[in-house]
Amino acid sequence: MVTLFGISGSLRKGSYNSGLLRAAVELMPENARLEAETIEGIPLYNADVETAEGVPDVVERIKDRIAAADGLLLVTPEYNNSIPGVFKNAIDWISRPPEDRIRVFQNRPVGIIGASAGPHGTVFSQTAWLPVLRTLAMRPWFGKLLYVNGAMKLFDSSGNLIDDAIRSRLKSYLEGFVAFVRENR
Ligand SMILES: Cc1cc2nc3c(=O)[nH]c(=O)nc-3n(C[C@H](O)[C@H](O)[C@H](O)COP(=O)(O)O)c2cc1C
């Protein structure tokens, strides 16, 4: 059994990216499962808070779940052609303290997908993640790309993915990523 841990980088109730992650949970290949998480409840990073109180419990729980998984799936929105601050903030907290980075991130397979309203479907935010993943010494999978553009036509008002062509591409992405994780975990 391969276990993936997936994080949606949006706090919006009807989020396309949270909907994409929910669809991914449904479309996982046999003998593989995907645990879905949000960034809800993660405070803004503050080094003074870290020094005084350590890493918040909500962040420690996510760190442990990533460390227990065989691979990480980032489902990223795009703001102003880059990573939304709330998602970067979450990963910044998760990367603390530096001694835990090896346990949580190093050599862990990682996939990135994302949905946006615009015409490029998160190509810029997915690309903006790459230096972060390199810094965390992760192992990104580049075998397939999934940039979901024009999302308002593909998701319903609750953020559920209703487009069969994207569901099929997502399924194929997950098959490829799970195979990569199996080889590299
Ligand atoms: C501050 C801001 C900047 C945005 N910039 C982009 C952008 O650069 N490219 C894009 O495709 N969509 C952009 N959007 C639209 C988002 O794709 C849209 O809000 C989408 O719903 C965000 O993902 P979510 O549904 O998962 O929250 C932006 C939205 C906001 C609020």
Image (cartoon, rainbow, N blue to C red):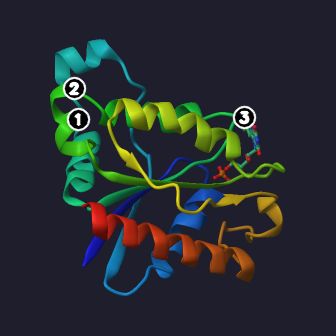
Tell me which corner region of the image, top left, top right, bottom left or bottom right, holds residue 69.
Answer: bottom left
Sequence-wise first label, 1 or 3: 3
Q: Residue at x 48, y 71 (%)?
A: 176
Neighbour tally class for label 3: few under 14, some 14-19, many 20 plus, Cα within 10 Å: some
User: CA gap, disc 1 to disc 3?
Assistant: 27 Å
Where's residue 128, x and y in %?
A: 58, 34
Neighbour tally class for label 2: few under 14, some 14-19, many 20 plus, Cα within 10 Å: few
**Closer to the camera, 4 or 20?**
4
User: Is residue 93 placed above or below 1 in the rendered structure?
Assistant: above
Q: Secondary structure at mark 1?
A: helix
Q: Secondary structure at mark 2?
A: helix
Where's residue 11, x and y in %?
A: 55, 47
Label 1, ligand 1: CB separation under 8 Å: no
Quadrant position of ligand 1: top right
Identity of the amino acid at label 2? Pro
Neighbour tally class for label 1: few under 14, some 14-19, many 20 plus, Cα within 10 Å: some
**Closer to the camera, 88 or 49?**
88
Where's residue 111, x and y in %?
A: 46, 55
What residue did someone put label 3 on? 81
Q: Is residue 91 left or right of residue 113?
A: left
Q: Residue at x 72, y 82 (%)?
A: 164
Image quadrant in which the N terminus is located = bottom left
What residue did someone put label 2 on? 98
Sequence-wise first label, 2 or 3: 3
User: CA gap, disc 2 to disc 1?
Assistant: 5 Å
